[in-house]
Every structure is written in C-alpha cells, then in structure tokens.
Image (cartoon, coloured by chain):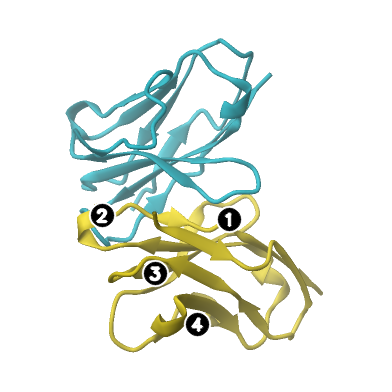
Chain colours: A yellow, B cyan
Amino acid sequence: AQSVSQHNHHVILSEAASLELGCNYSYGGTVNLFWYVQYPGQHLQLLLKYFSGDPLVKGIKGFEAEFIKSKFSFNLRKPSVQWSDTAEYFCAVNAGYNQGGKLIFGQGTELSVKP
Amino acid sequence: EAGVAQSPRYKIIEKRQSVAFWCNPISGHATLYWYQQILGQGPKLLIQFQNNGVVDDSQLPKDRFSAERLKGVDSTLKIQPAKLEDSAVYLCASSRGRGVDEQYFGPGTRLTVT
C-alpha cells in the first residue's frame, strides 16, 4: 500500500532561517506529489505540486520542492522563512489517474517561526 | 469563486448518538471527497464521489458511516452510532475532475464524541 512519511513532527525556526521539510513516499510507479499548507484557522490549501518534467518545482510564497525519484523523496524548501510561514505542512501523493485522485497524506509537520 | 462550504463547523455528541455533516462543493466540480483527520495525523480519504456515483469507499467504516451525494452536488456524511474514536475533523474537498486535478478543501467540521 502507498504511504507517505514526513520526517519531522514539529520544527521551530527563527525568522530568516532556511527551511527543509522531508517527505518520503512508498510507491513504485508513476506518482504525482503535492505539498499542502494549513495556516492557523484556515483551510488546507495547495502550496505546490509535481506531475512531470523539471523535478524542481516552485510554489507560492517562495517555497520550492525537489522530486528525487531514486530516493522516493519530495522535500520542501524555503531559503528564508517568515513569521507568517507558521503553519502545518502536509506532503501527499497521488498514484495517478487510475487511483481516481485519491490523495495519501503524510502525518504533517508543524512549523513554528519565531519573530 | 465561492469555496467549499461545510456545516456545522463544530459538533459535540455523546457516544452512540448519530450526527450528520453537510458539504457544498465548488460549483461545477464533479468530484467530491470526504476525509477524516484525526489529531496529529494527516487527512485520510473516507469516500470519493464522481458526480453522484461512488468511486472509492474502501476506507469507509460502512457499519456506521454512510454518505450520499444527491443530484451530484451537495453531499452529506452520517455517523450512526458514533464511537469515541470518531472524534476528528471531517474535511470535504472537491475537484473539477478525477485524477490529478487540484483538490480544494473546505474548513472542516470538528467532531467531539464524549
């Protein structure tokens, strides 16, 4: 069965620090990968996605993620975090059209940015 | 464009009672999803509709959970009878089609079973 693992449950950073959140998935076939974010009191919203092509994808608010197929990883990065990036971040995988759009989520990483 | 609407936002019930949640997806979105998010975990798909037909309900506890999507628009999710372990946030999402279309999430309903 497909699964998604996020390495860190809670990350605490100071403003301007660099961020990298780990995500690994288990599935041997073609996958589509997503990072969702949930700001305090708000809905889950899409941060970025990878379907095919350039393995380095850019999302909103300066976030980017790199798909490394050989490592089954899709890590999220941001060079300099802001207090407003405080949120919970979820990595998710979809094993393509045949899976009907079903997303498998990781357990989430809570990011706290200190001003 | 209006987002996915859900109600109620919060619900507290006692175990063995029943409860229902409502979802109105984004207009024109054919696919509707219900996810369960237990505290400290990521969302888990319960059921997926394509228009008014069920695509995937493999993780729906069918002995107590039921869902319907009348006329391919609004949807309701029901739990009867509720158990303590059903305490969670129930998220509704919709997408334009199947496959890899972006899913848009509603605010969720936080259920507490006492």
In space, the residues marked 4 and 1 are separated at their CA atoms by: 20 Å
In this view of the protein, which residue sits in the foreground, A115 or B40?
B40
Q: Between disc 2 and disc 3, whose residue precedes?
A: 3
- Asked whether, in this view, residue B105 is left or right of residue B9, the answer is left
In this view of the protein, which residue sits in the foreground, B111 or B39?
B39
- Asked whether, in this view, residue A16 is left or right of residue B61, the answer is right
Q: Where is residue B58 in the image (x, y as percent from the top left)?
A: 33, 37
Secondary structure under badge 4? strand
Q: Quadrant of residue B62?
A: top left
| Disc 4 residue crowd, few under 14, some 14–19, many 20+, Cα 10 Å | many
Q: Where is residue B106 in the image (x, y as percent from the top left)?
A: 45, 45
Q: Quadrant of the image for the C terminus of chain B?
A: top right
Q: In this view, does A95 lie above or below A72?
A: above
The reply to whether discs 4 and 1 touch (Cβ–Cβ < 8 Å) is no
Which kind of residue does numbered mark 4 sit on? Glu
Q: Where is residue B111 in the image (x, y as percent from the top left)?
A: 59, 28
Pointer 1: what residue? A107
Secondary structure under badge 1? loop
Pointer 2: what residue? A99
Residue A77 in sight from this viewpoint: yes
Chain letter for mark 3:
A
